[in-house]
Amino acid sequence: MSAEGGARESIELSIGQGRTPWRFWVLPGVLGVLLVALVATSVVLLLDRREPLPEEIAVQPADIGSGSLGDGAAQQAVARARLAARTYFTIDFTSVEADMDRLRDLGTPDFVEEYDETAAALARRVRGQRLRLSAALPDNGVATEYLSQNVAQLLVSVDVTTQRGEQRSTGAYRTRVVLQWVEDEWLVAAVDEVA
């Protein structure tokens, strides 16, 4: 018997005599770690079940277009978002200040302040180019993105017709209207055109 053959026999005998190589323990070890992680995650998720704060309680969306709006705050948000979008895109060179005042009347003080920063330049442009913009809203053109007890965010589809002299063109826009519930009514906090 050679020395090499004797070494092989001793390795095979040591495996057969109860000593298991490390690679046989890898799979059960990994499965054990995964099981512990799964149990720990489940415990954390169960313990984290808490009551939401009142401002986090979502209200049922009211994507109801121009149908009967009812009296609920969600329906009022849809109606106010439609009015805000229509008012934002309706401006005539003969009544620029009155048109802008109608939008200011719908807004929060912060919105009005931000709007006023660009209002003078917009008024000059509308008067200078003798523009008439008018907005039309499709019946089902409102989608609620977020609605809680004091904040609403809605997407409104608006068809805007721009007229300059005899030239007339119509374009479709999507507008995000953000509302805040202030003293029992929705006020406009932001109006943003969406691509």
Image (cartoon, helix red, strand yellow):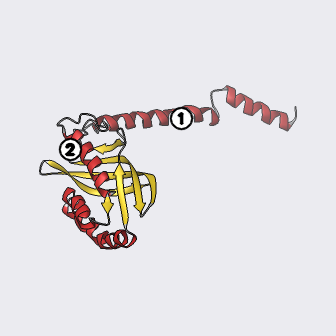
**Label disc, if present, on residue 149 of the rendered structure:** 2
Q: Residue 28's spot in the image, x, y percent? A: 55, 31
Q: Which of 106 and 16 is in front in this view?
A: 106
x then y, percent, for residue 127: 34, 71
For numbered disc 1, what is the local secondary structure?
helix
Q: Nearer the viewer, residue 115 or 50?
A: 115
Q: Can residue 152 be seen in this view?
A: no
Which residue in the rendered view is the most extreme toward the right?
1
Q: How crowded is mark 2: few (under 14 residues within 10 Å), some or many (20 or more)?
A: some
Measured along the vertical axis of the image, is residue 36 above or below residue 193?
Answer: above
Task: In this rendered view, identify the residue nearer to me: 139 or 186.
Answer: 139
Q: Within the image, what quadrant is residue 30 found in?
A: top right
Quadrant showing the N terminus: top right
Q: Residue 67 carries which label?
A: none
Q: How far apart are marks 2 and 1 (CA)?
A: 50 Å
Residue located at (22% from left, 52% from top): 180
**Residue under circle 1?**
29
What is the count of numbered marks? Answer: 2
Which amino acid does the dot numbered 1 rest on? Answer: Gly
- Tags 2 and 1 in contact by the CB under 8 Å rule? no
Location of residue 47 (image quadrant): top left
Q: Which of marks 2 and 1 is nearer the N terminus?
A: 1
User: For residue 11, which quarter of the picture?
Assistant: top right
The residue sitting at the left extreme is 183
Residue 68 placement, left or right of 89: left
Task: Please give left or right for residue 17 compared with residue 43 in the image.
Answer: right
Left or right: where does residue 77 sit relative to residue 157?
left
Q: Position of residue 163 (x, y in %)?
A: 41, 60
